[in-house]
Image: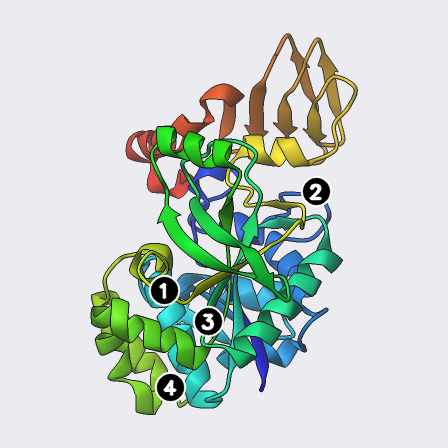
Amino acid sequence: MSRYVAIMAGGVGSRFWPASRERRPKQFLDILGTGKSLLRLTFERFLGMVPADRILVVTNEQYRELVQQELPELSDHQILGEPSRNNTAPCVAWTAFHLHQLDPDANFVVAPSDHLILKEQAFLEALQRALDFTERHDALLTLGIRPVRPDTGYGYIQYVPEAQHGVHKVVRFTEKPPLEQAKAYLASGDYLWNAGIFVWRAATVLDAFATHAPDIYRILEAGRQVYGTPQETDFIRQAYPTTPDISVDYAIMEKADNIYTIPADIGWSDLGTWASLHAHLDKDEAGNVLQGDRLLVQDVHDAFVRVPRGKVAVLRGLDDFIVVDEGDVLLIWPKSEEQAIKAVRKEVGARFGKDLI
């Protein structure tokens, strides 16, 4: 049974504004300061599991050239370009139809392009175990992360203690619960975060769409005969924008009864915000993450500072701030209020021009 990887790389990354823009979102940026984009790091990580010709990238059509620049190893047919942003459920369904037409036994991983994985060997071992399991079972499997705070932005997985080769049956999958419920889940100790990294056979997940998200299934199933052919692009351009805008978590994971999880200690972060990036990068003795080669800071603590190479920046008297200088936009913002960055991004676009967002 052949194994594949599908990397989802179509998001805008608005919470990483002003570095992440519509024209070049965060997955194409060197956010970690390694000299490589997040997409490139994700691709290279998966080369430890499958060859390059078994990796697909699903992205917005406007980013096709960016993907080709970052991943020249991929042929054009390995890049699936979405004509509209309809969330992750249509993305996963299209990928499954595409792979199933090419290989009816396709067994594949679906993963975001912009997550941080510090323990790469443990990550690959967990995925190998997951693929072994989904090869033998009609299972929808997700990697689970032990929660460290009552975060309302993640899905929560309640699972049975007994395991089969490290794989646990899921009792309940709850997407983005309210705060009090998230606190109760954390206190109970028997819930995991959903990392958004899924493993399943194409046939299995298509059955789940047919049962739990029939509108998506019906629209995309109409093109079954053209997947993998030159006519696929034209069909997708017409059909894909008519699919419901819904996440795969709400569309099938909350509803299906064949959900499984592998608790995985992989050094994971979804890198959703500047603060989460600050938390995972090396810091100086004052708790600062400093990205720039000509920085002078005095009395600055617990800050994230990102300025272009060659630019002199002098900072004093900042505590717990985000400072991001992108040349045409300078953001100086309290780290504790970073959830408001999405809103201020929209205001900047409305007042000063959409080219800035």
Instruction: Please name whichever residue, 85 or 212, is drawn nearer the observer in this view of the structure.
Output: 212
Amino acid found under the numbered disc labelled 2: Gly
Query: Which mark lies nearer to you, 3 or 2?
Result: 3
Query: Which mark lies nearer to you, 4 or 3?
Result: 3
Whole-angstrom CA distance, mark 2 to mark 1, is 42 Å
Which secondary structure, mark 1? Answer: loop
Instruction: Please name whichever residue, 173 or 29, is drawn nearer the observer in this view of the structure.
Output: 173
Mark 4 / mark 1, whichever is N-terminal: 4
Residue 266 has which mark?
A: none
Instruction: Please name whichever residue, 149 or 50, is drawn nearer the observer in this view of the structure.
Output: 149
Task: Report the residue marked by disc 3.
Answer: 139
Tell me if mark 3 has few (under 14), some (14-19) or many (20+) residues whose alpha carbon lies within 10 angstroms of its own.
many
Residue 257 has which mark?
A: 1
Task: Report the residue marked by disc 2.
Answer: 33
Tell me if mark 2 has few (under 14), some (14-19) or many (20+) residues whose alpha carbon lies within 10 angstroms of its own.
few
Instruction: Please name whichever residue, 58 or 3, is drawn nearer the observer in this view of the structure.
Output: 3
Whole-angstrom CA distance, mark 3 to mark 1, is 9 Å
Amino acid found under the numbered disc labelled 1: Asp
Amino acid found under the numbered disc labelled 3: Ala
Mark 4 / mark 3, whichever is N-terminal: 3
Q: Is residue 76 left or right of residue 216?
A: right
Residue 27 horizontal/vertical position (percent):
55, 52
Q: Is residue 9 visible?
A: no
Task: Report the residue marked by disc 4.
Answer: 227
Amino acid found under the numbered disc labelled 4: Tyr
Mark 2 / mark 1, whichever is N-terminal: 2
Q: Are marks 3 and 2 in contact (CB under 8 Å)?
A: no
Whole-angstrom CA distance, mark 3 to mark 2, is 38 Å
